[in-house]
Amino acid sequence: MSSDFAFWKAVPGDLGEIYDKVCEGITDGLLASGDVLQFRGELLRRFPEVKDELEPGDFDLADNPEDAEKYVLLTLSYGRLRDTFGEVLDLAKAHGLVGFSGVAGEPIFFEE
């Protein structure tokens, strides 16, 4: 059992629709942001084993390197979800990103 979560810089539009597009690799309308790139880098530093669970992957970035600054789609197993999800959310919040849960089908809200 696993869960997909997407993170990106806030842009106008329905978060569920943006999530669906991101899952299909459609990034039109998403902002390139150093915050997304820093979030991605920090995830890989803290959890190097998520490299294979992180999109866009190296193969995707070879064709569209700018996507590394647009979004992060992370697939977490139940165990990793339990052990690391809080830290992932804290990182996303620290970088000012929007989050969406694919399994729950709803935005991830960051409390102030």
Image: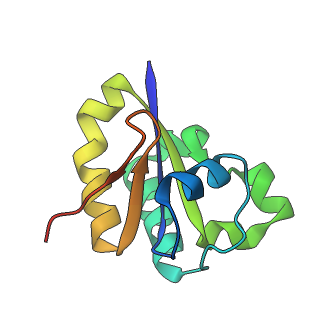
**Quadrant in the rendering for residue 72:** bottom right
Colour mapping: rainbow
x and y percent of residue 2 in the render? 45, 25
Residue depicted at x 50% and y 71%: 36
Quarter of the N terminus within the rendering? top left
x and y percent of residue 86 in the render? 22, 47
x and y percent of residue 16 in the render? 50, 51
Quarter of the C terminus within the rendering? bottom left
> Is residue 30 positioned above or below 49 on the image?
below
Counting the numbered discs, the total is 0
Q: Residue furthest front?
A: 14
**Direction from residue 98 to residue 32 in the image, left or right:** right
**Quadrant in the rendering for residue 51:** top right
Residue depicted at x 76% and y 60%: 61
Frontmost residue, 48 versus 75: 75
**Direction from residue 41 to residue 107 in the image, left or right:** left
Frontmost residue, 31 versus 42: 31
**Quadrant in the rendering for residue 65:** bottom right
> Is residue 31 positioned above or below 23 on the image?
below
x and y percent of residue 49 in the render? 48, 39
Residue depicted at x 69% and y 67%: 67
Residue depicted at x 83% and y 60%: 62
